[in-house]
Image (cartoon, helix red, strand yellow):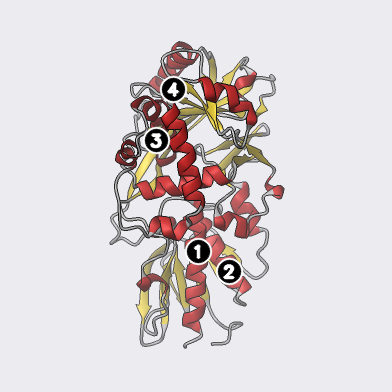
Amino acid sequence: MNKNEAQIAVVGAGMSGLIAALELERLGYSPQLIEASDQIGGRLKTDVENDIYYDHGFQVLLTAYPEVKRYLDIEALDLMSFRPGALLFEDSTRPIQIGDVNRDFNFLWSTLLTSVATLKDKRTLRKEQLRLKEENEDTIFDRTAHTTTRVYLREKGYSARFRNAFFIPFYAGIYLEPDLITSCKLFEFVFKMFAEGDAAIPRKGIAEIPRQIATRFERTSIRFNKRVSRIVEDSMANSAVLLINGKKERYDAVIYTSAPEQVDLKWNSCWNFYFEVDEVNKKFKDIISLVASRDSLINNFYILPQKTAKAKSILSVTVLGNPKDQEQLIKSLQLEFSALCDIHLGDCLKSFYIENALPTYKKMRSLPRPEHVQPNANSGVFHAGDYMLYPSLNAAMKSGRLAAEAADRYLALI
């Protein structure tokens, strides 16, 4: 098929759809990007008020992600990188600081002297960093052995205190589930990415990432507020029909970035609150803080790089799960921060409840199932989305790229 004449639709302008459209352009096509809402980015959302950037949920960019290196201009994103460590609130309002000494020498004494991690813990941590440095995404996710992250950490021999004070709250904030029942495969991949690059957020919010991709479009048309309610594959005509806002449209190929109805996708949820704070110690600058207590509402928090018009700092805190009473949550958080962290929260400036924050599933893989990416002479419908691989920005971008390549192979046959 002539690439200039091919009609291709990408359904969904999240990161999978954006990358799919960008790749289709690179391959010589002019795709239509069809989005149900009025903005691009999917789960990567940022509100801007009074020059303050409020992300919908605490989402960090891991600069070591292979697809991030492939597609993003890191320098142009103007990142605020977190220091490679954490502040741990265990049973005192004075936090314990630990970190990767090999990447930030300022962590040396606090990490060496802390009793949170035993000498064996520190040796095991370094050994695992070196082991996983020799692994790649495929070897990690293609392993047949599988267990939960919680069991994996215990089997690796980390002490109970180190697991409870650091690993469990830290990875609970990544998985958005406190029991670490998520696969150890994801743990190993994320652990490797943290060790090999920075964890960062764009100073103008996480939505800068999809915006950067969209600015590169030359032949992609984006259609907002267009909801696709149905896809019908027409094998006789080698095409697919989309029902968009009640009207039928025919395409030679379609890349669909939402999970099909037959995929019983579960989601982890969270609350994200932004509070005004009068004064914060400089030790909280550019670092993630964790609260170890399972009874606490607080999972993690950090201080934003911007300040309010009154020159006050802004604290972002994540609460896991779906407690619904927002006003009671705010009051409880104010009490907990005072009691556990000696931080006195002011007004709540912004809050978000993210019901579908992160997909969760047991089977994770580095490549989609063959039927999703191999050209089929009877079907022009392909799928993309992190739900096909594992929950992360890297998987979303990768699945979009692979779907575009599969669509190109398919169109070459008809």
The disc, 2 or 4, on the residue closer to the chain's N-terminal end is: 2
Read off the residue under disc 4: 116
Mark 4–mark 1 Cα distance, whole angstroms, equals 42 Å
Read off the residue under disc 2: 23
Mark 1–mark 3 Cα distance, whole angstroms, equals 27 Å
Q: Nearer the viewer, residue 368 or 352?
A: 368
- Residue 295 sits in quarter: top left
Q: Nearer the viewer, mark 1 or mark 3?
A: 3
Badges 2 and 1: C-beta atoms under 8 Å apart? yes
- The residue positioned 31% from the left and 60% from the top of the image is 261
Residue 275 in view here = no
Q: Nearer the viewer, mark 2 or mark 4?
A: 4
Where 95 sits versus 77, above or below? Answer: above
104 left or right, relative to 181: right
Mark 2–mark 1 Cα distance, whole angstroms, equals 8 Å
Read off the residue under disc 1: 400
Percent position (x, y) of residue 226?
49, 61
Residue 47 in view here = yes
Q: Nearer the viewer, residue 204 or 103?
A: 103
